[in-house]
Amino acid sequence: MRVTMYKTIVGLAAAAVLSTGVVYANTSPAYKVGDVFKEQIKGLTGTNYVMEQQEIDVTGDNIDDNIIILGQKETKEDVYHSKVNILVKDGKTKSLKLVPVGGGYDGTVKIGDFDGNHINDVAISLQNGGSGGTVNSSVVSFDGANPKYILKDGEGHELVKIKGKYIDDFKAEIEFLNIKKTIVLDLSAKKDQYIESEIYDKDGKLLKEVEPWTDGLKTFNLVDLNGDETLEVMTSTSICGDSHVDRISRVDLTMQYLDGKWDIKKMSVSQPIIENPLKSYNQK
């Protein structure tokens, strides 16, 4: 897992649990990456291994906090973590906040400001190992009394919302609901496949309804494009048609979290477009 810092991890023994999910802890022996995390914390089950950690302020009080990434797996040799959690020890109060962020293989942790409040948030992206090559990505804010998801694992496919259908002459009509744009894609490169699957006849007449949908995120790259110290997400996804393997277009986009929601700033579509060109969209 790639992070910007590598430091010794301090173990945390929970002493009391509050209804908010925040616990208070005493300091116990140090851990290093790859060790079993031995402390008992509410919400943490199974055997957990220390994946990575950083020390940086994420609560907004200008005091470094200890951010620990914990992954649950059966043995140390396993590469897949069935459950991954972000554990934050508040550098001032010593309280703990534990947030689940799905599961996956070794990934990337990035800490920076996503929501524009000048307080660092924690982002983690994990490979899910599926045939679609997607990643499980989460962004969590720790600056309030309780952690808040800016992006929750499993919700990545909702960032690009579409409504579409296959139409006659080997075409697909796609409406991008986020930006209120509709395009028509050329599907003729797959005409033989569609005829064999009895989706179209040889003359291009549609034989059954197909409603395209978006797959999960393929990438999750974080950059500050305009120098305002707020991170944007550069990512990509696929539009699928009749099945998961029927990928009819790739969509590359840049998004920013503003006013409690994700806005598309830039977007491009790879598949040949027949009508209403949208090769590249830029928000005005």
Image: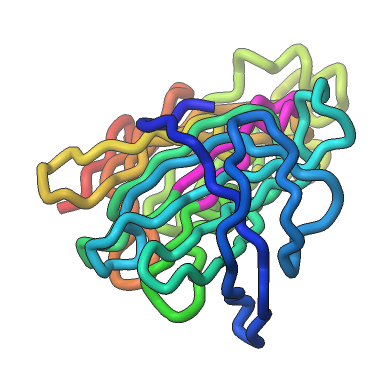
Q: Quadrant of residue 204?
A: top right
Expressed as whole percent of the image width and height from the top left, the position of residue 255 reads 34, 48
Expressed as whole percent of the image width and height from the top left, the position of residue 63 reads 28, 61
- Frontmost residue, 76 versus 147: 76
Q: Quadrant of residue 119?
A: bottom left
148 sits left or right of 214 in the view: left
Q: Is residue 265 above or below residue 244?
A: below
Q: Residue furthest bottom?
A: 19
Q: From where the camera sits, is residue 145 visible? A: yes
| Stretch in magenta | 123-138
Q: Is residue 22 above or below residue 18?
A: above
Q: Is residue 140 above or below residue 125?
A: below
Q: In percent of the image, x 33 and y 50: which residue is there?
A: 56
Q: State which quarter of the image contains the N terminus.
A: top right
Q: From where the camera sits, is residue 170 visible? A: no
257 sits left or right of 106 in the view: left
Expressed as whole percent of the image width and height from the top left, the position of residue 159 reads 49, 52
Expressed as whole percent of the image width and height from the top left, the position of residue 49 reads 72, 38
In this picture the colour scheme is rainbow
